[in-house]
Image (spheres, rainbow, N blue to C red):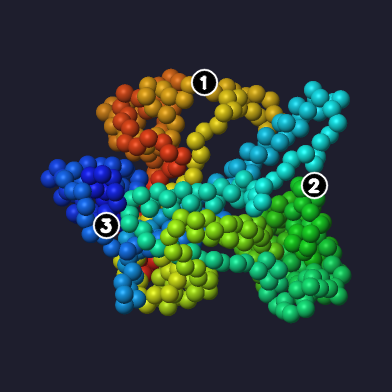
Amino acid sequence: MAVFVLNKHRQPLMPCSEKRARLLLERGRAVVHKRYPFTLRLKDRVGGDTQALRLGIDPGSKTTGLALMRDTADGQRHVLCLFDLNHRGFQIKKALAQRAAFRRRRRSANLRYRAPRFNNRTRPQGWLAPSLQHRVDTVMAWVRRLSTLAPITALSQELVCFDTQKLKNPELSSVEYQQGALLGYEVREYLLEKWGRECAYCGTGDTPLEVEHVVPRSRGGSNRVSNLVIACHDCNSAKSSQPLTDFFATDKGLRKRLKVNGHTADTRLDRVQRQLKQPLRDASAVNVTRWVLFNALKATGLPVSVSSGGRTKYNRLRLGIPKTHALDAACVGAFDTLHDWQVTTLTIKAMGRGSYQRTRLTKHGFPRGYLMRQKQVHGFQTGDMVKAIVPTGKTVGSYTGRVAVRKTGRFNIQTEQGAVQGISHKYCTVIQRGDGYGYHLTPSINLTGGAGQAVA
């Protein structure tokens, strides 16, 4: 992975190799400007020649891939850095739902006399839900941050559009889009055809079949077709309100029926899980945010080129490149060959900057603990990247990671190998102040599928 370089006035220069970065540090010509992503600042250089760099973006619902590349005139593309940006949309949605529940309880308990108000809140043009807006804002934050670290001159975005109705039924065409997926079917007949007129669980045919809920109604399951299967009476009765995996793992009668029909529990469970309709939340999130992200990228003033997901897949398969989010970003657009793609990927996880809420609650809404009022303890703050060298005790060793402060002065450090608890603040040194993200390096992937060497 290339190292970012800034000149004396903190203006971006061309990234350099790790070997050159070590030499610059050893000779005293540079200092460490930032640890994640690793950036040097030169002491004795003001200007310098730069080349055109391109930032490829592969938007995703949970993870967005970023790739910094250098293009040549003859269609060659050289990868300099790879990034996986993990979003926290689900956590935002969960926090907002909890806040709404608290507000609802307060108003019902304390303001019973106030008339409900529903239509007094307006939303601006182009409004997105906070969990979706977070995806756009996070990507744009890193586009701006990388633009201050490298001379980026162009952007490439995979402008993918998921056909959600086609995902439900790949054989839909023409006027069937308007008619719906169940035209001409009753639910029972649709399920019989979908599951081949045999029990979805044990594979028994030529027997009366019943409509069965995969996730029982008692556990919050719905009546949607995606939650329904056809099952024989024995399987339907035996499963009752059990989860699907527990039913396959513990029911002896099911195993006997599977053996008679020539199936195994593992293969049959895999088949059922594949057949069930996959949730389309992630596809919908990408569909909603793709044009908003495109317009935000255009507002940067840099030229933005877009490409389809099919073109990205074609490039990746043509060159024999494994599928990761970051490598998909490197394969966006039109080019001939891709060089130096076997580099370490920096995984960036959006962690947030804490909460104003100082009271921790149980799932029923009752207080279970209180947080301290101050954010800093002995000069450290939750989210800081620290290095701790512990000379004695049960936790003897060297640790580098994200710190969680405690009022007692004994901190927890989240390393790549796991959490280490009870580290005294006396042994900790800040290497980078918290910026709302967590970082770790992912080893490169070789053509054989194995992992390469990670460079710290």
Question: In the rendering, at what x and y percent does residue 110 appear?
Answer: 79, 23
Q: CA distance from mark 1 to mark 2?
A: 42 Å
Say which quarter of the image contains residue 276.
Answer: bottom right
**Considering only vertical position in the picture, is 19 above or below 323?**
above
Q: Which residue is mark 3?
A: 14
Find out whether the residues at labels 1 and 2 contact each other: C-beta distance under 8 Å: no
Q: Is residue 50 left or right of residue 211?
A: left
Q: Which residue is mark 1?
A: 373
As drawn, the residue found furthest toward the left would be 27
Find out whether the residues at labels 3 and 2 contact each other: C-beta distance under 8 Å: no
**Considering only vertical position in the picture, is 77 above or below 9?**
below
Secondary structure of the residue carrying numbered label 1: loop
- Mark count: 3
Q: Which residue is mark 2?
A: 218
Q: Looking at the picture, which amino acid does disc 1 mark? A: Arg
Q: CA distance from mark 3 to mark 2?
A: 60 Å
**Considering only vertical position in the picture, is 453 above or below 397?**
below
Residue found at x 45% / y 42%: 437
Q: CA distance from mark 1 to mark 3?
A: 44 Å
Question: In the rendering, at what x and y percent does residue 350 appear?
Answer: 49, 45
Depth check, mark 1 against mark 2: the one in front is 1
Q: Looking at the picture, which amino acid does disc 2 mark? A: Ser
Q: Looking at the picture, which amino acid does disc 3 mark? A: Met
Secondary structure of the residue carrying numbered label 3: loop
Secondary structure of the residue carrying numbered label 2: helix
Task: Report the front residue among 332 and 119.
Answer: 119
